[in-house]
Amino acid sequence: MSRLTGQVAIVTGAGSGMGREIARALAQEGASLALIGRRSSPLAETAALVGGTARTFAIDVAQWDAVERTIATIARELGRIDILVNNAGTNTRRRSWKDAEIADWDVVVRTNLDGVFFTTRAVLPTMRSQGSGLIVNISSLAGRSASVISGAPYSASKHGVVALTQSVNLEEWRHGIRAACIEPGEVATPILEFRPEVPPRETWSDMLQPEDIAETVRFIATLPSRVLVDEIAIRPRVRRLG
Ligand SMILES: NC(=O)c1ccc[n+]([C@@H]2O[C@H](COP(=O)([O-])OP(=O)(O)OC[C@H]3O[C@@H](n4cnc5c(N)ncnc54)[C@H](OP(=O)(O)O)[C@@H]3O)[C@@H](O)[C@H]2O)c1
């Protein structure tokens, strides 16, 4: 299907996990893609997987100057920005109140929260001038209710992502801009390797898979622009975590 032909989509954290599958789904719908992440080689792999025409930008979303420069380049070279998927995110091994250091708080909050604020702030002028735009933020079930497994910094950052989504909708709807928040439970991706106790491999097939989140993004992105999806919480049927 080609329901997004003519649209330009930016996916952050596109080199692995959900970001790679989200890029694939949006490319299947005909969108032109700009892929963001810190490491260039996984981004190049994703670009090759989605057909080779995607642009890649190896930057840290927590660096405002780099984000501003990159988004300006995308708007100039691709001509417009229709969809921003804020998917880049991280966690650290030290995440309990007993273990987390200030450095853990900094890296998690700067990536998960500053990163979403920075990319959103950077795309809004282009979306306003177009009179349209969709921002899809990947929060977490830990953004609805704090989680011991995720830890305080991650839970706080993902609650913040929900608030950023809501505030975009409160202020920007007049300009034709919509924001949606997806709040996944456990998804089988490399981020699980950062857990203090990595879930046993035999449990990964019971978790959500990256393509499940990609299908959710596809669903949101292909709805008519009159439709605003505020939040979608999505979890595995198997209740491994209770
Ligand atoms: N897996 C789960 O159970 C789960 C559940 C709920 C929500 N989430 C959220 O889902 C999103 C995607 O994560 P994932 O599960 O697919 O894990 P993942 O495979 O580790 O993906 C995270 C991606 O973000 C990129 N990234 C990390 N820090 C970055 C930074 N500062 N600047 C730019 N890119 C950065 C990473 O690439 P580089 O290292 O190359 O930068 C990586 O490609 C995250 O926001 C995560 O918090 C995950």
Image (cartoon, helix red, strand yellow):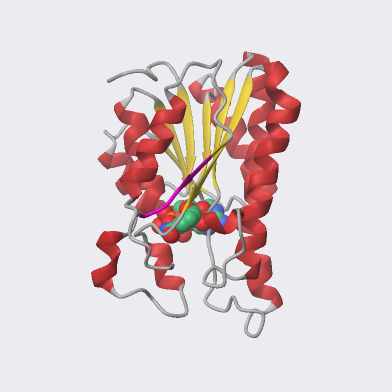
Does the magenta portion include 233? yes
Residue in view at x 27 percent, y 20 percent = 1
Q: Position of residue 99 (x, y in %)?
A: 62, 84
Question: Mostly what secondary structure, the magenta segment?
Answer: strand
Residue nearest the observer in this picture, 202 or 83: 202
Residue in view at x 53 percent, y 61 percent = 90
Locate residue 23: give its quadrant: top left
Furthest toward the right, the residue is 171
Q: Position of residue 95 (x, y in %)?
A: 59, 75
Left or right, 219 with reference to 99: left
Residue nearest the observer in this picture, 17 or 204: 204
Q: Is residue 175 above or below residue 70?
A: above
The magenta stretch is 232-236
* Image quarter of the C terminus: bottom left
Locate residue 22: give its quadrant: top left
Tally of numbered tags? 0
Q: Position of residue 201 (x, y in %)?
A: 26, 71
Residue in view at x 68 percent, y 29 percent = 169
Q: Is residue 169 above or below residue 97?
A: above
Q: Is residue 93 above or below residue 7?
A: below
Does the magenta portion include 49? no
Left or right, 145 with reference to 35: right
